[in-house]
Amino acid sequence: MSERTFSIIKPDALAAGHAGAILSRIEKAGFRIVALRMRRLTRPEAEGFYHVHRERPFFGGLCDYMSSGPCITMVLERENGIAGLRELMGATDPASAAEGTIRKDFARSIEANAIHGSDAPETAAFEIGYFFPGVELSSVR
Ligand code: CMP
């Protein structure tokens, strides 16, 4: 079944000029870009987006970093899209990410880790609605 997921090409990857290479990998892996917008998050937007992590010690640094420069927010669609994108991204910490994954090749650190992807259908629904209100979670095709 075709499934939508939400992704961010993070400020470190954009600043380093990796946005095109990352998008190319996403498209080559069979994802369709449903919605895409470059934007610089405000700190409150970053805090709201990552609210599930608000008790974590890295929350403040993560929100500072995510609002430090422009990023690319996207809704992507593919068969098994949520798990498929996470496989393509690799582990959160690039030091543990598998060869050939986006984070292995482009991420700088566990915080500046190049790309975000939703981890479950419920989070995909929240994240898509947070940045693209009006875009449906499930495919219409
Ligand atoms: P992401 O997939 O966007 O989801 C939460 C983010 O928090 C994660 O990627 C990292 O950028 C960041 N993160 C997770 N764990 C840590 C950590 N231990 N230290 C710093 N940042 C982290």
Image (tube, rainbow, N blue to C red):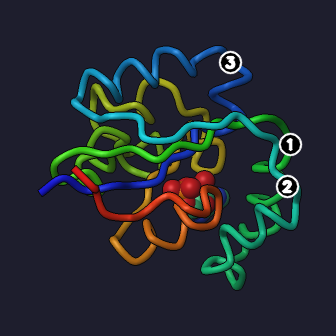
Label 1 residue SS: loop
Mark 1 or mark 3, which has the lower sequence index?
A: 3
Q: Residues within 10 Å of mark 1 (few under 14, many from 20)?
A: some
**28 above or below 26?**
above
Q: Secondary structure at mark 2?
A: helix
Indicate if the residue with disc 3 has its beta carbon within 8 Å of ligand 1.
no
| Residue closest to the eye, 1 or 104 | 1
Across and down, in percent, residue 63 comes to 79, 60
Give the structural element (helix, strand or loop) at label 3. loop
Indicate the amino acid at tag 1.
Answer: Ser
Disc 2 vs disc 1: Cβ atoms closer than 8 Å? yes
Ligand 1 picture quarter: bottom right
* Residue at x-position 51% and y-position 41%: 35
Of mark 3 and mark 2, the one earlier in the sequence is 3
Type of the residue with mark 3: Ala
Q: Position of residue 25 (x, y in %)?
A: 34, 23
Q: CA distance from mark 2 to mark 1?
A: 6 Å
Q: Residue at position x 72%, y 75% from top?
A: 57
Residue 16's label in the rendered image is 3
Quarter residue 14 falls in: top right
Disc 2 marks which residue? 64
The residue at the point 74 percent across, 70 percent down is 59
Q: Position of residue 29 (x, y in %)?
A: 23, 29
- Alpha-carbon neighbours of circle 2 within 10 Å: few (<14), some, or many (≥20)? some
Which residue bears the numbered disc 1?
68
* Quadrant of the image containing the N terminus: bottom left
Residue kind at label 2, given as amino acid type: Asp
| Image location (x, y in percent) of residue 38 | 70, 34
Quadrant of res 97: top left
Extreme residue in the bottom direction: 55
- How far apart marks 3 and 2 lie (CA) works out to 18 Å
